[in-house]
Image: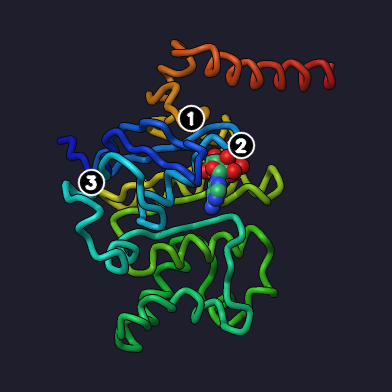
Amino acid sequence: MTEPVIQFKNVQKRFGKNIIIPDLSFTINRGEFVTILGSSGSGKTTTLKMVNGLWKPDAGEILINGQKISSLDLVKLRRHMGYVVQQIGLFPHMTIAENIAVVPKMLRWDQEKIEQRVEKLLDLVQLDPQKYAKRYPNQLSGGQQQRIGVARALAVNPPFVLFDEPFGALDALTRIELQKEIKRIHESLADKTFMFVTHDINEALFLGQRVMVMHEGQIEQFATPEEIVTYPATSFVRELLGTVQQNQSLWGNYHD
Ligand SMILES: Nc1ncnc2c1ncn2[C@@H]1O[C@H](COP(=O)(O)OP(=O)(O)OP(=O)(O)O)[C@@H](O)[C@H]1O
Ligand SMILES: [Mg+2]
């Protein structure tokens, strides 16, 4: 059954005189993995920040679970939304376990429950708790730190998780490994809604059950990867797909 959980209705966002997002409408359903793909400056981060209430729209309406975001307690709302970004910002003076436990601690979970949760989350992101829980962030590789970022975002079991180019700074192999991980994690956790911003078309098509292609604050196409590849809706989408084919042909020539 499809149940709308994130709805934008004619949302507009301006910064000063600049209209960054003129008129954005879309619906995301419970349990979906949606990727947002678009060129730099197309409004991807701005859209995510409106979902968790960091930015307010200048016009239109955002509904979360059918409720107007303007009527919700934003502190509570953000607790229901994990957020993973590229500069993951782990606290350097805290151990990995302490970093993951920041929000549970704030919510005054008891110590035993926190320890069990940390262990479960480290297992989930495939880092051995025995080995990693007591380490400090600078003792981890970039890819491992991003895994901790994912674990931390999932700490209090939020129904929504927002990702803003979380793997942007990683090398290609680590990136592919983490893409597989995040897909597996989404499949293993029932009913979690993921919004994942990227400007890597391969990443968007691999991860997204639906892909929202944005350009200059507007949706060019919002469809399954298959539909996008088979029936690109606009010339912008066609050009995006063209860059992939071009890369593949470059690669092909190079290895001939
Ligand atoms: N706080 C701000 N004040 C003024 N303008 C802003 C602000 N934040 C974003 N913008 C502008 O809004 C537009 C969209 O920015 P946004 O960060 O949403 O793009 P993006 O799609 O996430 O790009 P990127 O792929 O580079 O991260 C850009 O033109 C940007 O300069
Ligand atoms: Mg951005």
Mark 3 nearby-residue class (10 Å; few <14, some 14–19, many ≥20): some
Sequence-wise, which precedes: disc 1 or disc 3? 3
Element at label 2: loop
In which of the image's four quarters is ligand 1 placed?
A: top right
What's the amino acid at mark 1? Met
Q: Which one is nearer the viewer's eye here, 244 or 139?
A: 244
Residue under the point 68% across and 51% down: 169
Dot label at residue 40: 2
Q: Position of residue 49 (x, y in %)?
A: 43, 52
Which quadrant holds the C terminus? top right
Sequence-wise, which precedes: disc 2 or disc 1? 2
In this rendering, the answer to whether 130 lies above or below 40 is below
Which quadrant holds the N terminus? top left
What's the amino acid at mark 3? Leu
Residue under the point 52% across and 63% down: 149
Q: Can residue 179 be seen by looking at this rendering?
A: no
Q: Position of residue 232 (x, y in %)?
A: 47, 13
Q: Which one is nearer the viewer's eye here, 217 or 194?
A: 217
Ligand 1 within 8 Å of disc 2? The answer is: yes
Q: Is residue 68 left or right of residue 48?
A: left
Element at label 1: strand
Ligand 1 within 8 Å of disc 1? The answer is: yes
Q: Is residue 5 left or right of residue 126?
A: left
Q: Is residue 178 left or right of residue 46?
A: right
Residue under the point 31% across and 80% down: 107
Sequence-wise, which precedes: disc 2 or disc 3? 2
Q: Are the two marked residues, 2 and 1, in contact with CB atoms closer than 8 angstroms? A: no
Give the quadrant of residue 156.
bottom left
Color theme of the render: rainbow
Residue farthest to the front?
17
Dot label at residue 214: 1
Mark 2 nearby-residue class (10 Å; few <14, some 14–19, many ≥20): few
